[in-house]
Image (tube, rainbow, N blue to C red):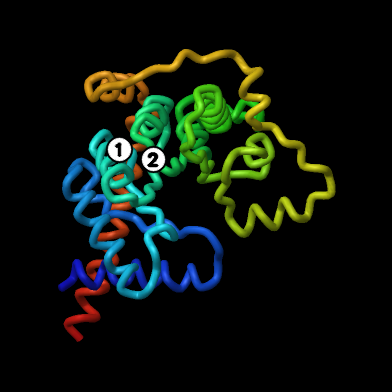
Amino acid sequence: QIEKAFDKLLVNFGSKILDIVPGRVSTEVDAQFSFDKEANIRKALDIIALYKSVGIDKERVLIKIASTWEGIQAARELEAKHGIHCNLTLLFSFPQAVAAAEAGVTLISPFVGRILDWYKTSTGKNYAAHEDPGVESVTTIYNYYKQHGYKTIVMGASFRNTGEIKELAGCDFLTISPQLLGELQAEKADLLRKLSPEAAASAAAMDKISLDEGAFRWALNEDQMATEKLSDGIRKFNADAVKLRKILREKLAA
């Protein structure tokens, strides 16, 4: 009963958002399934069925899944077998982006600000926007996708300042908070496009790579920042889900 109420609440929120915005809404699979491919698939199908029951087509929904190996393989199957669009979140590294592109997912959400947070804590340095490690990560991923013709949308997320956003102007999508949108709106200077397919084509050529499970896990493990931030993100998402379940349990018991 709690699980049904949990999913229904997410879909109710998503439906209301879709009344206001064009395009798609992202609805997240519970983080507790981050390391379970089949559970991710089952939950995604349940969510899409709930959207269908309120008259919303699957074309308007992105199923949001953590960028673990299991999550990426679940997204591969959802896209290829069920025609369900996926948004791979908690993406902090190039290997995760490569695996997502190979899986043919609709969209990835590389986290810019959380990468910066880790490096600032780790090094004690402040970074100018053009040398921001999160900006550099998304730029590399964008250029790689464009150089090799991948259709996966790169949606930069988790911004800490407008400098990061300006450095990534031209990225396929950016998800920006109202506060930072307001700051950008208040600026008078022209916004120059930094990322483009043309700029990617003239950037340093990157060899196309392919990752099986072992190579993916090794590459991710070698990246201390990505390993820590992925684990931390899953724990935080799960903690929020636990809080929501507690609220629902109390409401249903009342």
- Residue 72, numbered circle: 1
| Kind of residue at badge 1 | Ile
Q: Amino acid at mark 2?
A: Val
> How far across and how far down the image is residue 211, in percent?
31, 21
Pointer 2 and pointer 1: residues touching (CB < 8 Å)?
yes
Earlier along the polypeptide chain: callout 2 or callout 1?
Answer: 1
The picture places residue 232, in percent across and down from the top left corner, at 33, 41
Foreground pick, 102 / 88: 102
Residue of label 2: 105
Q: Is residue 13 above or below residue 220?
A: below
Left/right placement of residue 56 relative to residue 130 reads left
Label 1 secondary element? helix
- Specify the quadrant of the image occupied by residue 220: top left
Horizontally, is 93 left or right of 140 in the view? left
SS of the residue under disc 2: loop
Along the viewing direction, whichever of 98 and 32 lies nearer the viewer: 98
